[in-house]
Image: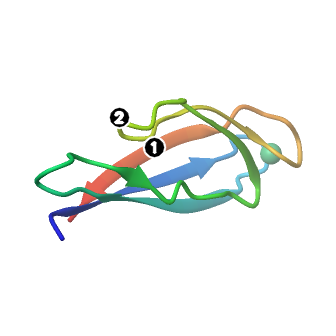
């Protein structure tokens, strides 16, 4: 129930040009607020999430598994 928000992440390695997309979904409801869940796992990037359960998930650090370069992190919202 409630509004479902999707937050789509795009990670890109500036060195290998690898690009990977991931999606997290907000299963919010009107009585207990938002509950972000389903933090996605990335295959080509090591990702560290900000450690808050109540706020929307944010990637604060991502690095390329292959070469170790810091990844470019971009995201967008959709309903
Ligand atoms: Zn790389």
Q: Do the residues labelled 2 and 1 touch (CB within 8 Å)?
A: no
Q: State how far apart marks 2 and 1 are (Cα).
A: 18 Å
The type of colouring in the image is rainbow
Residue for badge 2: 55
Give the farthest residue toward the bottom.
1
Determine whether 49 is above or below 31 in the image.
above
Q: In this view, does 32 lie to the left or right of 38?
A: left
Q: In which quarter of the image is residue 25?
A: bottom left
Report x, y in % for residue 28. 23, 56
Q: In this view, does 22 lie to the left or right of 56?
A: right
Q: In this view, does 71 lie to the left or right of 3?
A: right
Q: What element carries label 2?
A: loop
Residue for badge 1: 74
Label count reads: 2
Q: Identify the residue at horizontal 58%, vertical 49% (top origin).
A: 11
Rendered-image quadrant of the C terminus:
bottom left
Q: Identify the residue at horizontal 36%, vertical 36% (top origin).
A: 54
Q: Identify the residue at horizontal 11%, vertical 54% (top origin).
A: 30
Q: Which of 65 and 56 is in front in this view?
A: 56
Disc 1: CA contacts within 10 A as few (<14), some (14-19) or many (>=20): few
Q: Quadrant of residue 78?
A: bottom left
Determine whether 65 is above or below 43 in the image.
above
Rendered-image quadrant of the N terminus:
bottom left
Report x, y in % for residue 15. 77, 41
Q: Which of the two discs, 2 and 1, sits closer to the camera?
A: 2
Q: Identify the residue at horizontal 71%, vertical 31% (top origin).
A: 70
């Amino acid at each position: 129930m409630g509004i479902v928000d999707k937050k789509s992440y795009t990670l890109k390695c500036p060195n290998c040009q690898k690009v990977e997309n991931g999606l997290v979904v907000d299963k919010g409801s009107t009585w207990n607020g938002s509950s972000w869940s389903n933090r996605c796992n990335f295959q080509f990037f090591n990702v560290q999430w900000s450690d808050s359960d109540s706020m929307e998930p944010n990637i604060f650090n991502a690095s390329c598994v292959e070469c170790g370069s810091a990844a470019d992190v971009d995201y967008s919202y959709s309903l």
